[in-house]
Amino acid sequence: MANLLIKRLPNIPYLPYIAMSIAVPALLVIFSKKAKAANQRASTPYNNLKAFLTMIQYAEGTYGQDAYRMHYGGQLFNSYARHPNIAITKSGITSTAAGAYQILYRTWTGVQQALQLPDFSPASQNRAAIELIRRRGALQAVLAGRFEDAVEKCKKEWASLPGAGYGQRERSLALLSDVYRSAGGQVVV
C-alpha cells in the first residue's frame, strides 16, 4: 500500500525516508503503550501490596519520612537495632506499638523469631507486616486487589482499620480505599 502511494507521488528522491521518519516514531509510541500496559498488568500484585502497606501506614498515622521510627503516640526512636518495647500511654490507652505498622512488642517477638529478622529496620518491618497480613489470611486478597476483603481480614491486626473495635480512632473504608488507589493499588470487586 505504501509503495502505491509513493509511486503516485511526484519523483522526490528522499520521499521513502521521509515517510519512514514519520511512521517509525508512531509505531514506537503504539508499541511502548502496549508494553507499558503489559508491564502494569504484570506488576499489579506488587503494586497492590505496596499500596496496601502504604494504606496501613496512613491508617495508623505513621505515613511519612519518619514512619519506620515512630512510637505509638508520635514520638520517634533512634535505633533500628531492635523493637523499642516502650509502653506509652496516650488518651487512656497504653501500647508498645512502634514502627511504620505500629507493631506491638509481643507481636514483633513472635514474627521476628518466625522470620529470623535481624533488627527492626524498615526492611524487617515490611517483612513483618506482610507476614501479619498473611497470618490473617489476607495476602491473596491484597495481591489480587480485593481491597475490602483484605481490610476485613486485617482489621483485628491494626486498630485503625474500620470495624477493628479496639476503642481507637478507626478510619473509614472510603478514605482508606482512596489512599490505597492513590498509592497505586487496583481494586477488584
Image: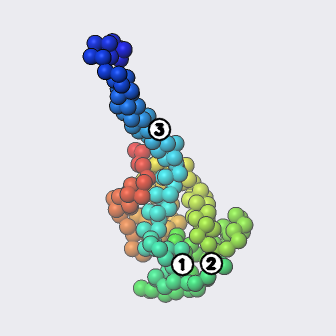
Q: CA separation, marks 3 and 2? A: 40 Å
Q: Amino acid at mark 2?
A: Tyr
Dot 2 corresponds to which residue? 80
> Compared with residue 115, is residue 47 higher up or lower down, i.e. above or below?
above
The C terminus lies in quadrant:
top left
> Compared with residue 36, is residue 3 higher up or lower down, i.e. above or below?
above
* Rendering quarter of residue 13: top left
Q: Horizontal and vertical percent for residue 80? A: 62, 78
The N terminus lies in quadrant:
top left
Q: Secondary structure at mark 1?
A: helix
Q: Amino acid at mark 1?
A: Arg
Dot 3 corresponds to which residue? 35
Q: Horizontal and vertical percent for residue 138? A: 54, 54
Dot 1 corresponds to which residue? 69
Q: Residues within 10 Å of mark 3 (few under 14, many from 20)?
A: few
Residue at 58% across / 60% down in the picture?
130
Image position of 84 (left or right of 88)? right
* Rendering quarter of residue 28: top left
Q: Which mark is residue 108?
A: none
Residue 132 in view: no
Q: CA separation, marks 1 and 3? A: 38 Å
Q: CA separation, marks 1 and 2? A: 8 Å
Image position of 29 (left or right of 80)? left
Q: Residues within 10 Å of mark 1 (few under 14, many from 20)?
A: many
Q: Residues within 10 Å of mark 2 (few under 14, many from 20)?
A: some
Q: Are marks 3 and 2 in contact (CB under 8 Å)?
A: no
Q: Horizontal and vertical percent for residue 142? A: 50, 52
